[in-house]
């Protein structure tokens, strides 16, 4: 979180928002919806919650919001492609 924020701003990007969200599908989905509805947000970067334990639900939370889905082999956020979100 902090390192990514530092690297993004250090590279000249503006950080529109940052949040820590509990491992809950609806909570994650709602936060992502807020960001994709915000015209000031061009990209959503997510870290954490992308492992293989039952509580790591970020991929399940985000997948229904995608307009274009990654290939099945890449569906795990362990290797994230660039995804387009429905706005």
Image (cartoon, rainbow, N blue to C red):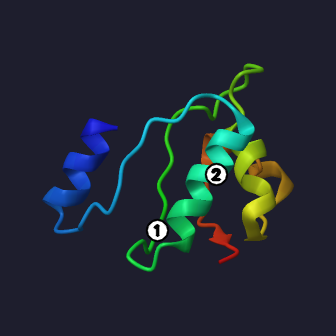
Give the x, y percent position of residue 73.
81, 50
Based on the displayed image, in which of its 4 quarters is residue 68 positioned? Answer: bottom right
The answer to whether 72 appears left or right of 82 in the picture is right
Q: Residues within 10 Å of mark 1 (few under 14, many from 20)?
A: some
Q: Nearer the viewer, residue 4 or 35?
A: 35
The answer to whether 49 appears left or right of 19 in the picture is right
Establish if 3 lies above or below 53.
below
Q: Which mark is residue 63?
A: none
Secondary structure under the numbered disc 1 in the rendered image: loop
Q: Give the residue at x 74% y 51%.
A: 74
Residue 76 is at least partly visible in this image = no
* Residue tagged 1: 43
Q: Which mark is residue 30?
A: 2
Secondary structure under the numbered disc 2 in the rendered image: helix
Q: Quadrant of the N terminus?
A: top left
Residue 10 is at least partly visible in this image = yes
Q: Quadrant of the C terminus?
A: bottom right
Q: Give the residue at x 51% y 47%.
A: 46
Q: Give the residue at x 78% y 65%.
A: 69
């Amino acid at each position: 979180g902090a390192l990514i924020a530092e690297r993004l701003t250090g590279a000249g990007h503006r950080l529109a928002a940052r949040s820590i969200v509990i491992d809950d599908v609806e909570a994650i989905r709602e936060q992502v919806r807020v960001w994709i509805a915000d015209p000031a947000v061009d990209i959503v970067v997510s870290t954490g919650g992308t492992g293989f334990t039952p509580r790591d639900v970020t991929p399940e939370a985000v997948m229904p919001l995608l307009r274009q889905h990654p290939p099945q082999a890449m569906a795990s956020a362990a290797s994230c492609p660039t995804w387009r979100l429905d706005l």
